[in-house]
Amino acid sequence: MSHTASRAHELDTSNFRHLYIGGEWVVPSTNRLLDVISPFTEEVVFQVAEAVIEDVDAAVDAAHKAFESGPWARMTPLERAKILEVFATALRRRRKEFATAWTESTGVITSMSDNSLEYAATAVDRSIEQATSFSFIEKHPPENSGNMLIHEPVGVVAAIAPWNAPLASMLTKVGPALVAGCTVIMKPAPQTPIEAYLLAECADESGFPPGVLNLVTAERDASDHLVRDPHIDKVSFTGSVATGQHIASVCADRIARVTLELGGKSAAVILDDYDLQTAADDLASGIAVMSGQNCAALTRIIVSRGRHDEFVQYLVAAMEKIIVGEPYDPKTQLGPITTKSQLERIERYIAKGIEEGAALATGGKRPSHLTQGFYIEPTVFANVDNNMTIAQEEIFGPVLCVIPCSDEADAIRIANDSPYGLNGSVYTNDNHKAYEIARQFRSGTFGQNGTKASFAIAFGGFGQSGLGREGGLKGLLPYLEPKTVMLNERP
């Protein structure tokens, strides 16, 4: 029986019934509220204001005015970076509150949430560093000519974050957008809006000009209205493929800029030189991260047919050792699924896997010792055909599919036989072979011997995993428009 008490009371909720627009906490147009439901107690732990179309219009108007006639876009990158430094300091002062918000809203275990702020805040640190390392004004030959390439802010940005990693995802958008000189409207997922409220509170004390950073919390209709607004110059979205497709079509209609970080069905190939138990232990611990609700998770495991059964034995043993429990329990390794609807979605995929003939090796049901909360056992399917639904569609939960292959070439063919292309890995002791296979994978990130990702370099995917990249220099450029200027002499 679940007995974890909510720690929601530890957060100051005084601003949660307001929206942050034009540098002020404003009363929304209606009394409508969004419920934030704890995934481990199944109770409403927070209620926040629900923005409607009139509120979205006010936020867009504030951001548009701040961009067109405010000082932000006309400041130098260094001047903007100084305010971002104050912002980063404000974020770090509230580390415990951000940790509580993530666990309360998503059920992520405290060993992750306790470190979430420092990891997420590095997005702002990178942006501060780019104020000096990136050439916002490039001089071009011939020498002494007035030929320049000037990188100017793209304009008003709608930053739309997902429910699984609301803080890190939002800051990965907000940091580069702000240092570029854009103004921003934060639109968090309605299931997990609390981190965005804390971000807005930090912004409110950091000295941003009014309208530079705004917050609206909205359901689908008002969110769609935001994306369609002609004053939104760029949309940066992280979430599902279906929503990403819709946003892309809306942006295409009016030639708005768009960055999409979508789903994944990432493959890991285990070569015959690698120890199976080591690979099994690593893959099991990897799928436990965020209860498998991680777009970069390695969920298709490809192993040679002759070693398939032995690997499955090791993987089942590793998965069955994972402690499923309440997120505040320090022993817990895998917490609940974030929402009831997502849990039910995972259960439908498990049923579909059984129906299509995959062998359920372990898991597949709710843990018997947890009668409250949205929990699912770590699950392994063996002898999966890559054409099966569970191998082609993103489950977004702690479910692994083991796929046998005939040889290395077949393994790479299977890995690339997917509409997604976000992440990939090869388990091998041969660095040269790892590089050789990396160059054959159709994925935005590739690692050796485990799940790897770097927002300091770039993160994003091929195919239906999205458009563009986040993090690093590649994550700054989408918030800038290059302007070629050719004068008779250098000014």
Image (spheres, helix red, strand yellow):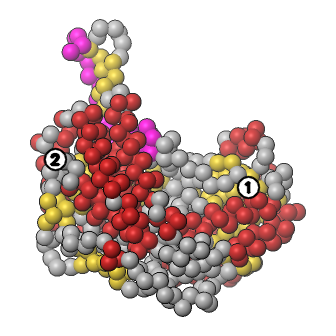
Residue 269: which numbered mark, if any?
1
Q: Secondary structure at mark 2?
A: loop
Q: Amino acid at mark 1?
A: Val
Residue 287: image x %, image y %?
A: 62, 66
Kindly identify which numbered label has been placed on residue 157.
Answer: none
Residue under the point 40% across and 80% down = 6
Placement of 378 over or under 42, stated as above or below: above
Q: Position of residue 162 (x, y in %)?
A: 41, 64
Residue under pointer 2:
209
At horizontal 60% and vertical 51% (from top left) the residue drawn is 452
- Chain part drawn in magenta: 471-491
Image point (13%, 70%), residue name: 27
The answer to whether one can see residue 99 in this image is yes
Q: Image point 13% across, 66% down: which residue? A: 26
Taking the magenta stretch, the answer to whether it contains residue 486 is yes
Which quadrant is home to the N terminus? bottom right
Left or right side of 169 for 425: right
